[in-house]
Image: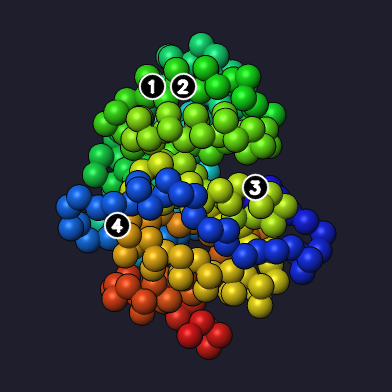
Amino acid sequence: MNFGKVDDPTVVDFSIPADDAATLRILEREIDDPLEVYVGCAKWNKTDLKDFYPKGTKDELTYYSRQFNSIEMNSVFYNMPKAEQILKWKDKTPEGFKFFPKITQSITHMRRLDNVEELTKLYCDAISHFEEKLGVCFLQLHENFGIKGFDKLKAFVSDFPKAIPLAVEVRGKEWYRDKDVWNEYCRFLETQHTANVIVDTAGRRDMMHMRLTTSTAFIRFVGCNVDQIDYHRIDDWVERIVQWNKAGLRQLSFFVHQNVEKSSPLFSAYLIGKLNKRLNLRLHVPAFASEQKQLF
């Protein structure tokens, strides 16, 4: 993932900003539910996750889904998913595994949310076949989709099936510059029970807005492939997640991307190990990464 990539990440201030004032209000837990945690990568194919799979692995998803409990599905961004394929993927994964599919680019980037009712229905009908293994769908808008499209975004989110959890990622810089629009946007997501995606990447620190709109935190972490920096960044995220958990966080979805994707499993596993210790969880630590001495 090259979004937000910079030539020299050592000059970037990667510190996590303070939470937006509204976040603690959102996190006030009414029911003492246990925290659900999903950590994974964006892809499962051997080409990108080189050296992750043991020699002789025949089915990548089957192996991946027994190491991680979730996947951020970028594959369905490029092509409209079909029910038959969804069922095949679902049947290869164990109980408790979750898919977090991105909404197809024909809806978001090609038609830019214009006249997408039929396409959205096709998409939702297909991904609904994940059934209990469907996590949160996420709508990622193009960087040039600005605040002039706010009404289209409102209409899309309002009409999106309420039975399917949704998260939204706006990339246009003006969403973050215009504080009045930003606050209106966040309040709208609250009314729709829609998560506000946080993106931690070097070149777009404005997307570290720390404004949750539901008690689900959906975080997309983009490493800079400088190990000592990325490990420290994950350590900082663990501290913030611990704070959010105390405040009432109900679900964490955290997906690790790297410009060199083959290291994504390693950093994902590092995060899992840290969360297990700090939150007394029992998430499986991937076998590939647990053998790496630098993890713990």
Residue that label 3 marks: 206
Residue that label 1 marks: 158
Q: Residues within 10 Å of mark 4 (few under 14, many from 20)?
A: many
Look at the numbered disc 1 and give the secondary structure of its residue: helix
Q: CA distance from mark 2 to mark 4?
A: 27 Å
Of the image marks 1 and 3, the number of the one nearer the N terminus = 1
Residue type marked 1? Ser
Of the image marks 2 and 4, the number of the one nearer the N terminus = 2
Q: Outermost residue, bottom direction?
A: 293
Q: Which mark is residue 62?
A: none
270 sits to left or right of 279: right
139 sits to left or right of 149: left
Give me the residue at 49% from left, 74% from top.
270
Asked if 258 appears above or below 211 in the picture, the reply is below
- Closer to the camera: disc 2 or disc 4? 4
Look at the numbered disc 2 and give the secondary structure of its residue: helix
Residue that label 2 marks: 154
Of the image marks 4 and 1, the number of the one nearer the N terminus = 1
Q: Outermost residue, left direction?
A: 31
Q: CA distance from mark 3 to mark 2?
A: 22 Å
Q: CA distance from mark 4 to mark 1?
A: 26 Å
- Closer to the camera: disc 1 or disc 3? 3
Residue type marked 4? Gly
Q: Which x, y percent locates residue 237?
A: 50, 66
Q: Outermost residue, right direction?
A: 7
Q: Which x, y percent locates residue 122?
A: 40, 22
